[in-house]
Image (spheres, grey):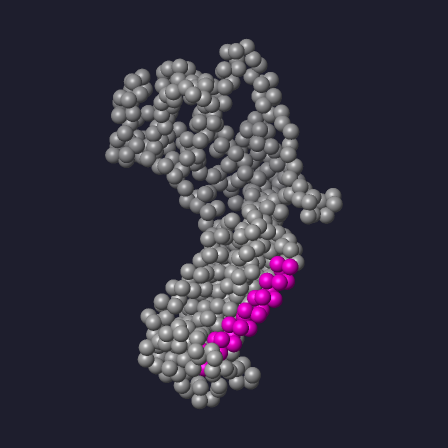
Amino acid sequence: MRFALLVAWREYAENAKTKGFWLGILLVPVIIFFSVQVPLWLEMKGTPTRYFVLVDQSGLVGPVITARVERDYQREVWRALKEYARKYGGSNTGEAPSLDQFINQGGQDAWLAELTPGLRPDAPPFKAPRRAFELVALPSGVNPEAQLPALAQELKPYLRGESHTELHGQDIALNVAILVPRDLAKQIVRSPGATTPTGIEYWSDNLADSRLREAVEETVNTEIRRREYLARGLDAAAVRAVEQTHVPVSSLNPRKESGREAVGAADIIKQWAPSAFVYLLWVAIFAIAQMLLSNIIEEKSNRIIEVLLSSVTPGELMLGKLLGIAAVGLTMVGAWILTLFAVLGWKTAGAVGTAVVTGPILDVLQSSRLLPMFGVYFVLGYLLYAACILALGSVCNTLKEAQSYMAVITMIMMVPLLTLTFIPKDPNGLLARVLSWIPLYTPFIMMNRAMADPPWIDLIGTLLLLLAAVAGALWMAGKVFRIGILRTGQPPKLLEMLRWLRR
């Protein structure tokens, strides 16, 4: 065992000196950090203002569309001011107003005037967020009274970027044109089977960002319904109040203790968090198994294996490599998880909006059994696949020869990814239970079922079967490794490798 530990330390030290190891340690945490921060940063600062023109020939919906766009912007200002007050305000800044109060009481200028006396001395000036969408006037020379086909034809060069319009003395590109027909009232669809008219025309070549289109559609339909209520002699306010009347449906979990059965955000996170750990488990096992394969092939092709076998037995060499690469993997995965906790803790203590999401995630990770189960299944899953990799690597002389074997292992490992999102929906169903009892899939599937309280027979039975499979795989790998590690020439056939097991 002493020589096996020496080999393990050598493997760990050699891999710890490589650039790939430190890239794995540092790059994944950086990816975790930026995957959380960059979308927020891009949403606030990276998305440019999109300019649109609005031509309402009907005179029915133009004001409500512009009011909706302005209200959406005021909501962003209100959120930014709440965050500004949280960061730089003192104890006497008072409570934040609601969005309606914020708008009705004067918006940004009024609330800033109220906040300023209580701000910290080092508070920077408040910077309002950029507008996502801004209304601009029609380009000069475009006739707003023209028929919509002619009007659209005149605007196409501006929408394609071939021509520019002006705003505050600067040339800008027009992104969207919203054209409301003169006969909008005649194009209202009142029955499901009616022929759908063209209606409002929304011109834009950006199909990915549908926020403005959805806002226009929702606002216009709300206004049209309000007018319909009035036309039929109904009180629109009363109808709206009736539409808001509802019976709430409470989600309750029978597995939770009495009095706390209500399902909250943390419960939803608990259901889906195992899937994230399954993906992390898959990436970790696959990457570290590849590292082990590259290591054994390189040392065999460079004849370093022969030097090592002059001092240790094949069994000690194999065990040392398993332990050394496992330690490398645990170091990398440990660094990733610590980074995840650090980022979640930072975001939970940081912005108000993100804390709503990151807080429950952090609570779930700290209070559940996800991390202990991840550790157990990582070690056992690694040993199972590493045994196969070691056996295959010992009979191959080059990475090219090993690729055909690795393709088979990769295909086997794809099954947990294909069922990644299905298993949480039916964690104790037939498919989940059957796959759980297949040792090659046990670490991934049982990890995905971790928060679904699987039956004890599945939890303990699959663990015992996995332990037996790991022991059997290591025994068979030892047999193949002992004979194949010094073999040269063409890789052996499968039947020949099976005969080695009987020696």
Q: Residue at x 44, y 25 (%)?
A: 65
What range is drawn magenta here? 457-482
Q: Magenta stretch containing residue 491, yes or no?
A: no
Q: In this rendered view, identify the residue nearer to me: 137 or 246.
A: 246
Q: Quadrant of the N terminus?
A: bottom right
Q: In this rendered view, identify the residue nearer to me: 98 or 276.
A: 276
Residue 117 percent across, percent down from the top left: 61, 39
Q: Residue at x 45, y 82 (%)?
A: 482
Residue 255 percent across, percent down from the top left: 68, 48
Instruction: Give the quarter of the image for residue 297.
Output: bottom left
Specify the principal SS of the magenta part: helix
Above or below — where is 492 with respect to 405?
below
Q: Is residue 317 visible?
A: no
Residue 95 percent across, percent down from the top left: 64, 37
Residue 182 percent across, percent down from the top left: 36, 16
Q: In this rendered view, identify the residue nearer to me: 465 or 190.
A: 465
